[in-house]
Image (cartoon, rainbow, N blue to C red):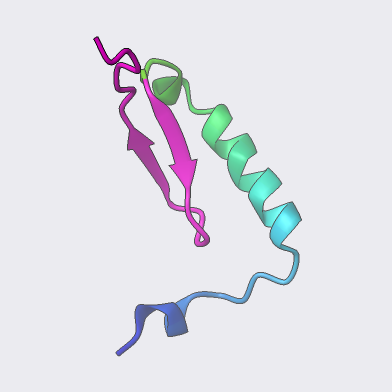
Amino acid sequence: MDAALDLPEIRDRHAFNLARWKEICANPELLKVEGRIESDATGASSLCPDFPTSVG
């Protein structure tokens, strides 16, 4: 069974994203995280560590 079929329909994607990012930014634990925080189409957040950008 496809898990995407169980997800609720999001009628206003922009409003959904703004509301989800308000929740993410209000989380004091995430303020302590170094790196990048991303969210996917379902609103699930994931943490991406920062990697050094210098080559040598």
- Which residue is the extreme one toward the left? 56
Q: The N terminus lies in which quarter of the figure?
A: bottom left
State the residue in front, 6 or 38: 38
Q: Main secondary structure of the magenta part?
A: loop
- Counting from the top left corner in percent of width and height, residue 15 is at 75, 54
Say if the magenta span includes residue 38.
Answer: yes
Above or below, 3 against 51 in this view is below
- Which residue is the extreme one toward the top? 56
State the residue in front, 11 or 56: 56
**Rendered residue at 43%/52% (across/down):** 44
Q: Is residue 18 left or right of residue 39?
A: right
Q: Is residue 12 left or right of residue 29?
A: right
- Counting from the top left corner in percent of width and height, residue 14 is at 74, 55
Report the magenta residues as a range: 35-56
**Rendered residue at 42%/25% (across/down):** 30
**Rendered residue at 35%/85% (across/down):** 2
- Counting from the top left corner in percent of width and height, residue 21 is at 60, 39
- Counting from the top left corner in percent of width and height, residue 27 is at 49, 28
Quadrant of the image occupied by residue 22: top right
